[in-house]
Amino acid sequence: MDYRTYALSFFHAPIAVFLAVAAMFMVCEDGKNVFNDGQCFNTVRYVHIWSLLNTCAYFMQDLFFLIFVIGDTSTMAYQTYAHHAVAILTFYETAYFMDWMMIFGCMLLFVEISTIFLSLRTLMFYHGYDKTMFYNINALLTFITFLFGRVIYQIFITFYLALPRLYNEISDKKMGTVQVAVSLQLGVMVMGSIALNCHWFMLMLNTAMRAMKRISGTEEQKPNIEKKKMLEMDQLRSDELTDDSESGDVRRSRNGMPIATDKPIQF
């Protein structure tokens, strides 16, 4: 993955999060929001359109640079290609129906809150700030936002809002065949995302625990094996030099130069 990807994602993520929050809490009147009012959850407004178009545009330019400029063929790159392509397709399909599915897609973008800290962590590493206290604090913030945004929040809105709504719509036969297919596609995408995020979260636990140990100063100091080996080799060469100086033999260093002894060299 290239530097430009992380730099742009650092700017895209806050915008996506702000639009997602606005779409959930700032567009319905009389204190209503998507969580306490069914009509609010089913009424598409301009902010939802702006939100999805902004993210689709980001995905498109990211795909273009990764494929045609960088030519990345790593495993992570192929995961990114699949993620971006499926997300773009699904978002545009939900935009066609202009109903709760589009609003739900906009709500999903709140998970980008962890991307802010993930991208910052990578950028700090690139610039050599990976040994600083702020880097360790940022790692903990990454862990917290990942847990809240990509695991707890995503599971909550999926099972509390989306799946009950989908069940009711299908039961009441309010959705056509194509609309059901799109909703199922959206569901598969979200379930896959939840599974991957849970897997990545488990991997992040070890990183967070190490960061906490570094901050508290209780991280166990591991022996430097390479340094230990070099010291042993130096001691061995010192012992050999002592033995050879007593016998008058000529010893040579790694670069082939003779090592001085106490006795004259015999030819």
Image: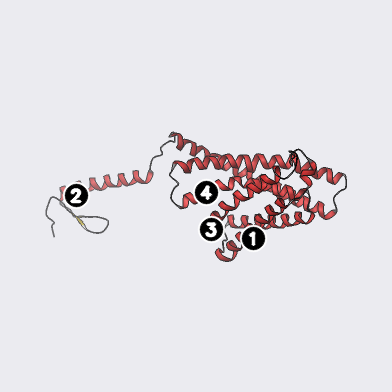
Q: Secondary structure at mark 1?
A: helix
Q: Secondary structure at mark 3?
A: helix
The amino acid pointed to by label 3 is Arg
Q: Residue 49 in the image: x percent, y percent?
A: 71, 54
Instruction: Tell me if label 4 and label 3 are in contact, CB under 8 Å.
Output: no
Q: Disc 2, disc 4: CB below 8 Å? A: no
| C-alpha gap between disc 2 and disc 1 | 70 Å
Q: Nearer the viewer, residue 137 or 180?
A: 137
**Residue 35: x, y in percent?**
74, 39
The CA span between labels 2 and 3 is 59 Å
Q: Which residue is mark 1?
A: 60
Q: Secondary structure at mark 2?
A: helix
Question: Which residue is identified by label 2?
Answer: 244
Determine whether, in the image, residue 170 is placed left or right of residue 153.
right
Camera-nearest label, 2 or 1: 1
Does the rendering let one see residue 19? yes
- Quarter-wise, where is residue 216 in the image? top left
Task: Out of 90 and 73, give the one closest to the viewer.
Answer: 90
Q: Residue 4, labelled with which disc? A: 3
